[in-house]
Image (cartoon, rainbow, N blue to C red):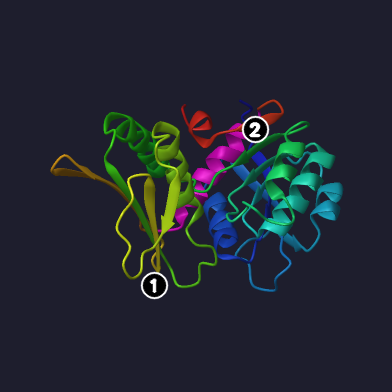
Amino acid sequence: MSADPTRIVITGATGRMGEELIAGAGDRNDVLVVAAVSRTPGSVTAEAAVGTHLDATLADEDDIDAVVDFTAPEATAEYAEIAADHGVAFVTGTTGLEDHDADPLGALDAASESIPVLHASNFSRGIAALRGAVREAASALPGYDVEISETHHNGKRDAPSGTALTLVEDVEAERPDLTDRQHGREGEQPRETDEIGVHARRAGDVTGEHEVLFAGNCETVSLSHSAGDRGVFAEGALDAAVALADCDPGRYELAELLQD
């Protein structure tokens, strides 16, 4: 890998994660924020110029290595296409991409034909480890009931969280007998053997908590993760951008980029 820093553009720069990314990049020598893009007015703690159009920003800047995106599904779909047009690697942590009219997942697939693309619902190394443990437990505990719960701050828009849905998918990959996602319960509703319980809570300023509970055979196994600061996610996204910039076109998983 080159000794020169990875040159990145951050979208959603005035959002919570955008500010964390800019602050985190300022403490590192391996990444440089060349420009920032935001469609929402606000203050950004960075010396990088803030624009409103990614296309113009990439056209004006030379030698951009990656775009790091934490925005909204419609914007992510648009930004992925623009990054592909300019031949720039694309990292996104935008959640809520499933079943959206803008088809952001399709846009990521299309972009990956010409650039390296990474979409992750969570950039924490701890979550990457949790996912591996959850898959192992799901495989080792056939027939056990599975409940997944998550808690986030009161301003989070999508529910369940993208990370919770990723954990659901991890369990389903190992337990094909679980075909019904039960989002909460009310009234008379006995648990069915083919369901996964999924529960979302929104309160205060909780950064992010996730728990996967396995229960059966007179025992319980609980696997959980709690993030104390959004900087955890920013660091993982910046690590991913540095690694992805050197990759060939295609879709990538966070775990494979963070192996080194």
**From what the image shows, is residue 146 above or below residue 176?**
below
Q: Secondary structure at mark 1?
A: loop
Quadrant of the rendered structure where residue 7 is?
Answer: top right
Q: Is residue 146 left or right of residue 26?
A: left
| Label of residue 135 in the image | none
Q: Is residue 29 magenta?
A: no
Task: List the residue tagged with mark 1.
Answer: 203
User: Is residue 232 at least partly visible in the picture?
Assistant: no
Q: Badge 1 local density, few (<14 within 10 Å), some, or many (20+)? A: few
The residue lying at 67 percent from left, 37 percent from top is 117
Where residue 241 sits in the image (x, y, percent)?
61, 40
User: Residue at horizontal 54%, vertical 63%?
Assistant: 158
Q: Quadrant of the N terminus?
A: top right
Assess disc 2: are there few (<14), some (14-19) or many (≥20) residues with their C-alpha within 10 Å of its C-alpha: some
In this figure, which residue is indicated by the disc labeled 2? 251
Relative depth, front residue between 231 and 115:
115
Amino acid type at mark 2? Arg
Is residue 239 highlighted in magenta? yes
Secondary structure at badge 2 equals strand
Instruction: Tell me where the magenta segment starts and ends, as one range.
Output: 229-246
Residue occupying the point 48% across, 49% down: 165
Q: Earlier in the sequence, mark 2 or mark 1?
A: 1
